[in-house]
Amino acid sequence: MGDRELAALYERCGFALYRRCLAYLGSESEAQDAVQEVFARAVEAAPRYRPEADPAAWLRQIADHLCIDLLRRRRRNPVRGDASDEVRAGDALDRFTAPSGEHLVLAHRLIASLEPEAARLAVLYFLDGMTQEELAVETGLSRRTIGKRLQAIVSAAHTLIATPEPGT
Amino acid sequence: MTTHLSGPELERVSAGGEPPPHAAACDDCAARVAAIADARAGYLAAHPPDELVRAVRARVDRRRRARFGSRGTVAVGLACALAAGALLFVRPRGEAPAIRTRGPAIAFTTYVRRGGETFAASDGQALRPGDRLSFAYAAPDARRLLLLGIDDSGTISRYAAGAALAAGRGQLPVGLRLDARRGEERLVAVFARGDQDEDAVREALADALAAARAGGGGIGDMHLELSDDHATIWFRKP
């Protein structure tokens, strides 16, 4: 992948990937770092990329797996960085996510409370607006499993909506 | 029924993609597309493409140099592993990946019988159709075995489920004869203390392969997350 091709792909998909990584990770610097890593992995995997596939979907998948790995590592080593970098409503998310910033804040709070595997389902469901059928195809899980897991995620979302954000 | 644009559709249209008919007729979607386009312009001004390209190239070059520089170390490590009989030690639940030589870990070894020769297999080893595999283990307490395999087409096979394993050293009550199919396969032996959730293991295998592929890897790059103790080995049939 040449520099011009890489730049064009970033111009097309970079912002969407940033929003996605921000929802997973909740930190501007981590999200921007994750975007760079997504494109680095894409460059390395480019020889194996199938041109008939949608590059945006391919990059989203790389971002999902990268962020889930980062969340797993965070759970194993729960050392937080600079607290000022953490997302709060009205901060980074609102700056780059209006008008759906409020939803993204809620999505991040939800994602942070979930197991990493469930976090990806939440992103696909809430951010991407996928249906259960689409989720089953995307994840390779059965419709029944998707239904059960979404039920648990939606219950967690309801609990979050009823619970004020810390510090508010 | 009104179907608003999905998240990816909003992103695509806001980046200049062809809008579907609904976008022109729906004020809500049009407003969201416009707002995302504005926010996107702000983001790209703060993080311009040339900056991203430089950062990505630096990352890729750094990794390439690190891989090239570590080849000697890897070769020495591989030789040590082979000399040690290629024992794979099971990770206890919830701990970071580590090789354990004492404590409650379960030892697991895969042996290959080819003609009159028997040798211990290591990760990534090239095997042949007709090779026979057998498995030795050592467990600190009684377990139940689940042995599954996943190949590079994503097909999952069950080789053993529910077999009782006694504490101590022993051989798994299952052996495999490799068929003629070419490609790669990963075997996973789960040593459960209680009931086994085979569906969960199958899902974890499928997810791990999907994750490896998304990162540009394959069977050899899978990272499994299971709640039960487990051992895994992968091989190639070139």
Image (spheres, helix red, strand yellow):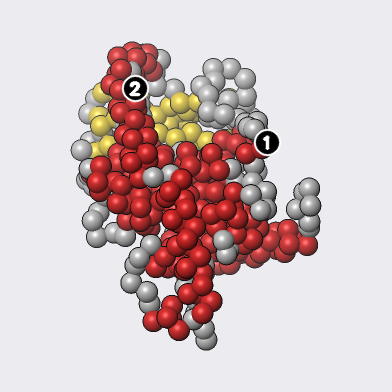
Task: Name the residue type under label 1.
Answer: Ala
Q: Dot 1: few (<14), some (14–19), or many (≥20) neighbours within 10 Å?
A: few
**Residue B237 coordinates in the image, percent (x, y):** 24, 38
Towards the viewer: B70 or B223? B70
**Residue A29 coordinates in the image, percent (x, y):** 54, 39
Q: Distance of mark 1 from mark 2, alpha carbons? A: 32 Å
Whether marks 1 and 2 lie on the same chain: no
Towards the viewer: B132 or A19? A19
Towards the viewer: B102 or A3? A3
- Subunit bearing disc 1: A
- Subunit bearing disc 2: B
Q: Can residue A36 be seen in this view?
A: yes
Q: Quadrant of residue A155?
A: bottom right
Residue beneath label 1, please?
Answer: A83
Q: Quadrant of residue A80?
A: top right
Specify the label residue B29 is tagged with. none
Residue A129 relative to residue A80: left or right: left
Residue at point 29%, 51% (across, down): A8
Residue at point 37%, 40% (across, down): B52
B83 is higher (above) or lower (below) than B230: above
Q: Quadrant of residue B106?
A: top right
Task: Name the residue type under label 2.
Answer: Ala
Towards the viewer: B81 or A161? A161
Q: Dot 2: few (<14), some (14–19), or many (≥20) neighbours within 10 Å?
A: few
- SS category of the residue bearing label 2: helix
Residue B71 relative to residue B110: left or right: left
Residue beneath label 2, please?
Answer: B66
- SS category of the residue bearing label 1: helix
Residue B67 relative to residue A162: left or right: left
Residue at point 39%, 68% (across, down): B13
B202 is higher (above) or lower (below) than B96: below
Q: Which of marks 1 and 2 is in front?
A: 1
